[in-house]
Amino acid sequence: MEDNFQSAYQEEQERLNTALAEIDRQLATLKSTPVYTGNDYTEQILEASREQRRGNLAKLKQEPYFGRLDFEENGGGERKALYIGKIGVDHEQVSDRPLVIDWRAPVASLFYSFTGGKEPASYESPEGIVEGLVYLKRNVVIRKRILERVADTFDRESDGPAVSDEFLVYRLGENKDNRLRDIVSTIQEEQDRIIRAAKNTALIIQGVAGSGKTTVALHRLAFLLYQYKEQVAAERMIIFAPNRMFLDYISDVLPELGVGNIQQSTFADWAAEMLGLELTQGDAMETLSRWFEAPGGMPEITEQTPGRFKGSTVLMGIIEEAVRRLESSSVPEGDFIPWEGAVLPRRTILRWHNEEYAPYPPAKRKERVMARIHRWIEMELKKSPSAAALKDRKKKGVQREKAYGAKWPKYDPLTIYKQIFRAVKTPADWPAEAPEAIPAAVLKETRSQLKKGAVLEEDLPPLLYIHYLLNGEEGAQKFDHIVIDEAQDFSPFQIAVLDLYVRGHSFTILGDLSQGIHAYKGVHDWSEMQSLFAPEHTSYHALTRSYRSTMEIIDFANGILSAGVHSDLLAVPVFRSGSPVRLIEYGESREADIRSALADLSGRDYRTVAVLTRTLVDAERLYEGLSAHFDDIHLIDGGITEYQGGLSVLPLYLSKGLEFDAAIVADADLDAYGETAWDAKLLYVGCTRALHELWLLHNGRLPDYLREAAKGGETAKGWPAVHSAAKAE
Ligand SMILES: Nc1ncnc2c1ncn2[C@@H]1O[C@H](COP(=O)(O)OP(=O)(O)OP(=O)(O)O)[C@@H](O)[C@H]1O
């Protein structure tokens, strides 16, 4: 065994030397070619390509590849060792064998999809299915040109037929810093299927916490850019994430994968920009704290809850009808008379509006009709009998044209939206049926909110839809692909509107219903989103393996899911064992115990440790106390745009999407969390943030689902006892 390992290591060292020599040689040649700065277009293109190769080789020369797959194609007669890296590069001296194969290339898919066994394996190439035998799957870790590790996960010659998780477990055991990383060397089969799925489908992915949803979505973007080079551009792709700090947290992955320029935004920021509206950060924070800071937990959610109703496609229908009515009654009453003696009959204007300009959306149609009226006035002016009459008519004409234009409805989304909600007062004047379909509670709350001039996040999809109906395709900026992370917090209306802004229903929609803590606005079931698309345009995938946390943490979180959320979307852990989850009852002082827990965990070899609280107010108070004892500690509130890592204090609801080497959940008791499924979901989110250590501190009165989940875990009363136990380990 040791000998095998030695010879494998030596073999890889030799191959690495050869590869590095070739990369250095290519780079030196490129560097010695003078940079072209002239005006010849063809030369400029060649220079751009050289520039890209220079950049690629400079990256490759540090870590040229991460994997090797030995494959013998049926009928090919030769077993080839394929080296797989982040960027492909040809061997300039050996024409039929690339030096490094891009991980996104068809043949590289075998590296991920092959799960072991002696049977033939296959992959899809542009020429058709290619079948053959896999002999070896090997991971190699190269850092700064040094071969650090060689790990075989499959060897046809050895006994074990399945691909082993050993290398994956080694990778997962590493500590994390303040940024999400790429996973090209260990993408798993279920993840690979999503990454390589065809472009023009709305992929809906339910993935348990830590199943790699965010990571997979980012790799998928890199794949689409590679596979559909001719059809997609990075600038026309967008990622929607829950907040700006989260965008910062994921911001390293795409550059690591060699991808730049992809748009990244929150839905609110993007929509507000499209609409030319100012949304203050305060609005979003206010909504959050309204739900999460409310004493006694979350108000009851029904289909009449404004966020849920405004996110439904029922409102979409109401808006469509309202805009249709508005448009059909938009041409002002009466003929147009620019001055006495000249008449443009209304029926002519109606003909222009309803027939000649029918293909245009309302706002454009109005513009065209008004331009036509202007031209008509100019023609009429030419008939003026004298210079004085011309002057007089011109003056009147300008005034009346302006007045006539003002009689048209104001094609402004917010005005129309307000009209829809106000209409119930004057049902005779304005869409008679529409308001009846809006539940009274929603009408009341929205009216008073709009009266105050506030536009909430939940108003943005309806406003965007009105904007789209008024301005049509022409005004729409179409994306090649849209990624929606934390999609359980999106509404069907939001997705339906976004579908108008993307080509070919090309979506990656990822989320976890068990983490749906924003239930006042999101979906309760993925079918709410699936039903927006024709069956041939959508596909559903489930990710069930969780890679983030140790088995102990996943088992504990699964316990919360079964006993508290009553969900069967349980996570399957990778076999990575760590310390037991600890439930620690406060001793004499809550603050002192939290401080000791933080001191203990931060004294270990962890890079990120978080204290998670129930509310922002709790986090602020704790932070105040803790910052006197810990130098480099950060408070994360809704306004933070950069995630710094290290020690953090934050309310649990803001921890979504993030992860920490160790997490301390403060006040995991009935004073802070109730017995409802929603409380359990909140705690589920918190507990699944931890990679290696999870400690829950409480006052002794635990919700039933935590008591249930804790069976088999480690519990202790009073901090010092556990502290010394931890020290004794
Ligand atoms: N195939 C893999 N190999 C190595 N690490 C992986 C793999 N898949 C996921 N991970 C790691 O698991 C962690 C969780 O990934 P990610 O944040 O993308 O999951 P998620 O499903 O979006 O989580 P959540 O819903 O809980 O926010 C990350 O640290 C990621 O690097």
Image (spheres, rainbow, N blue to C red):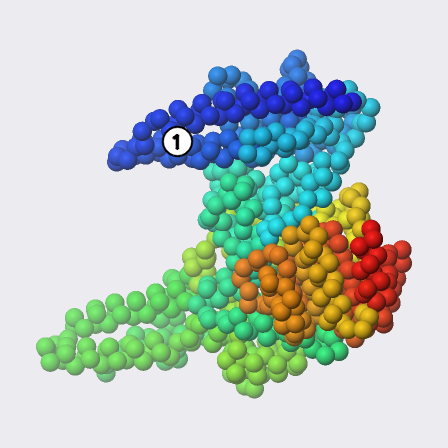
Which structural element holds mark 1? helix
The picture places residue 70, in percent across and down from the top left corner, at: 67, 22
Q: Quadrant of the N terminus?
A: top right
The picture places residue 530, in percent across and down from the top left corner, at: 67, 54
- At horizontal 42% and vertical 57% (from top left) the residue drawn is 474
406 horizontally vs 166: left or right: left
Of the pair 428 and 513, the residue shown nearer to us: 513
214 horizontally vs 324: left or right: right
Of the pair 552 and 155, the residue shown nearer to us: 552
- Residue that lies at the very extreme toward the top in this rendered image: 77
Snapshot quadrant of residue 67:
top right
- At horizontal 44% and vertical 63% (from top left) the residue drawn is 471
The picture places residue 551, in percent across and down from the top left corner, at: 80, 48
Q: Disc 1 designates what residue?
A: 50
Query: Tag 1: residue type?
Result: Arg
* Above/below status of 236 relative to 40: below
- Queried on whether the Cβ of the residue with tag 1 lies below 8 angstroms from ligand 1, the answer reads no
480 horizontally vs 699: left or right: left
Numbered marks: total: 1
Residue 426 in view (yes/no):
yes
* Above/below status of 579 relative to 284: above
Residue 527 in view (yes/no):
no
- Residue that lies at the very extreme toward the bottom in this rendered image: 425
Of the pair 1 and 311, the residue shown nearer to us: 1
